[in-house]
Amino acid sequence: MSSAPLTSTPPPLLPAKSKPKSPPPQHPLLSHLPHCTSLRSLAQLHAAAVKAGLAAHPAFVTRLLTLCTAPGAHPAHLAYARQVFDRVPHPADAVWYNTLLRGYARSPSPAAVRVFVRMLEEGVAPDTYTFVSLLKACAAARAGEEGRQAHAVAVKVGAAGHEYVRPTLINMYAECGDGRAARAMFDRMDGDCVVSYNAMIAAAVRSSRPGEALVLFREMQAKGLEPTSVSVISVLSACALLGALELGRWIHEYVQKIGLDSLVKVSTALIDMYAKCGSLEDAIAVFHGMESRDKQAWSVMIVAYANHGYGREAISLFEEMKKQGIKPDDITFLGVLYACSHSGLVSEGLQYFDDMKDHGIIPGIKHYGCVTDLLARSGQLERAYKFIDELPIKPTPILWRTLLSACGGHGDVELGKHVFERILELDDSHGGDYVIFSNLCANTGKWEEMNRVRKLMNEKGVVKVPGCSSIEIDNTVHEFFAGDGRHPKSQEARRMVDEVIDQLKLVGYVPDTSHVFHVEMDEEEKATSLRYHSEKLAIAFGLLNTAPGATLRVVKNLRVCPDCHSMAKLISMVFNRRIILRDLNRFHHFEDGVCSCGDYW
C-alpha cells in the first residue's frame, strides 16, 4: 500500500461526535436508494440523480456512500462509491471521508491513504473515527510505513491517546509485524483496556508466541477485566498452538461460566482448539452441541477430521453440509482435499478438486499443494511433477518441497535432484531441503552427490531445524529438544528412555536406522543417534509424570521419524497407554500397538 506521504498540515481535531447538520428537504428519488441491492440498480438510480441535479446532494451522497461501504458489500460497490465521491467538488463533511475509510478498513486498498490526504488538503478536520478507520485500513493492507505516518498525524492533532485510537494503533503495528512498537504502545497505556489486551494477545498468537498470549490473558483476568469473545478466541488459538489441552478445557469451562459458549465463533474456536490439541472426541462433542452452525464451523470440523486421518468421516460431513444447503468455500474444500491426501483417497480427491470450479471457487496455492501431496504420496511422482510444472500460477517452494519429501519416501533420486534444483532457484535457505535430498542420495548410494549437497549446505550457512516436542502435564507445557539437556528434567527423561528401550527389546524392538545416513557411523552409533529424539524424551517424561493408563499428548515441530513412530506403537501396547502425537503433517493416534495413520504419513 503506497501513496503520497501525509505531509499536509492537519486542521484542529473535531470532537468524536459532532452535532449533525439539519438535513435538507427530501427529494422523491432519495426514497428509492435503500431498495438498490445491486450495483446495476444503484448506477441506474445514480444516473437519474445526476439528471435531477442531485449528484452532490448531501443526503444522496451520504446514503449512497453508506450503502456501498456497508459490511459485506462487494469491492465493486466501494470502487463505485469512490467514483461518486471524487466527483464532489469540495467535500466538506468529515462523515463522508469516515464512511469511505471505514469501507477501506474492511477491504484493503491503497486508496485509503489517498482519501485521508485529500481530507487534509481540503481542510476537513479528522476526528477519532477517522483515525480508527484509517489505521484499520493500514493494518488490513499491512502498510506499516503509512500507518506510522498516520500515527504521527494523530499525535499532532491530539488523537493518539484516545481510548478508541490507542488500541487500533497497537493492532496496526502488530498486524504490520512491528511487535516492538505494538508493545511500546501497550506499555504506555495509562489505564486498563480490554481492547488493547485483545490486540496484544492476538498479536502474540499471530507471531507464534502462544506463551506470551497466555501470560497476557492471565494478567487481564488478574486486573478484573472481563474477557470478550475476541479475547477468548485468541487465547484458544494459543492453546491450539501449544497443544495445551487441559488449559483449553479450563478456558472452555470459563467460557461457559461467562456465557460466551452460545456464540458460533467461540464454539468454532473451541472445535479448532480441541482438534489441534489431539482430542477429536471433544471437538465432535462441541460441534454436535451447537444450536446453529455457520460455514466456518462446518469447515473447521471437516479440517479436524482430516488432520486426524479420518478421511471418510470428513467426506461424509462435507456431503451432509451440502445437504443442509450450506455452500462450501475454499477452506471447506481445503479440508476435504487434505482428508483425501492423508487417507490415500486419490480418485476422490481429484474429483473434489475438479468440483471446485462448479462452486465458482478458484484454487489457491494450498489446494494445489493438497493435490500435489495426494499424487506424490500415492507414488505418482511424475504426474505430480507435471501437475506443478503446468500450474496457471508460479509454483512456490512449498509445492516443490512436498514433492521432494515424497521422492525421498519413494527413493526416486533422479526426480528428486530435478525437484531440489527447482527449489534452490526459488529459495536456497531452507535446511530441510538439503537434508532430505542428501539423505535420499545416501540411501541410494550416491555418495558423491550427498557430499556435494552437504558441502553446499555448509557454504550457504544453512542449518537444520532442531526437533522439538512438547507435552502438557498439570497445566504446564514441557518442551524437549533432540539430544540436548535444556529441560531441567532432561536427565530423568533420558534414563526413562533407556529403561523403555530395554523393555521394548524384549518384545522385538530393533532401532530403525534406515534413515540415518552417516558413512562414518556403525549400526550401534546410528541407533544411539536416534535414541534421544525429542518425541522419545517427551513420551518418556509423560510416562514418568502421569498416572498409569493416562493418555499422553505430544506435539512435534517436525515430521515424526520412522524409528520414533515404531517405538510409539510398541509403547502404546507394552505400557497400555494411548499416545496422541501431532507432527508437522498430521495427528497419529497410537493404541494397542497400532497407529491411526496406517503407516501412511
Image (spheres, rainbow, N blue to C red):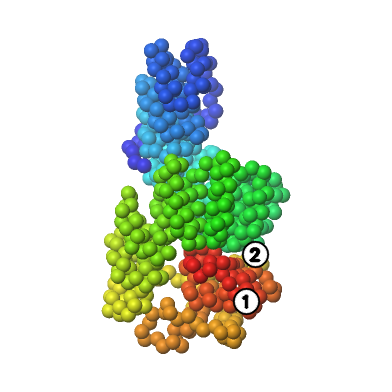
User: Residue 238 location, x and y as percent?
Assistant: 56, 57
Which amino acid, by three-letter code, is at mark 2? Asn
| Left or right, 116 with reference to 26 | left
Disc 1 designates what residue? Answer: 573
Mark 1 Cα-neighbour bin, 10 Å: few <14, some 14–19, many ≥20: some
Q: Nearer the viewer, residue 353 or 523?
A: 353
Q: Residue at x 55, y 57 (%)?
A: 312
Seen as rendered, the residue at the extreme front is: 347
**Above or below, 252 relative to 96:** below
| Left or right, 408 with reference to 186 | left
Nearest to viewer (mark 1 / mark 2)? 1
Of the two numbered discs 1 and 2 on the same chain, state the one appearing first in sequence: 2
User: Residue 528 location, x and y as percent?
Assistant: 48, 84
Mark 2 Cα-neighbour bin, 10 Å: few <14, some 14–19, many ≥20: few
Q: Residue at x 60, y 53 (%)?
A: 271
Q: Residue at x 59, y 75 (%)?
A: 593
SS of the residue at dot 1? helix
User: Residue 12 location, x and y as percent?
Assistant: 45, 30
User: Residue 234 location, x and y as percent?
Assistant: 57, 51
Q: Nearer the viewer, residue 120 or 341?
A: 341
| Left or right, 573 with reference to 53 | right
Q: Nearer the viewer, residue 14 or 535?
A: 535
Give the CA distance from mark 1 to mark 2.
26 Å
Asked if residue 304 shows in the view, the reply is no
**Above or below, 286 relative to 570:** above
SS of the residue at dot 2? loop
Disc 2 designates what residue? Answer: 475
Asked if residue 133 shows in the view, the reply is yes
Q: Residue at x 51, y 66 (%)?
A: 583
Which amino acid, by three-letter code, is at mark 1? Met
Label annotation for residue 373: none
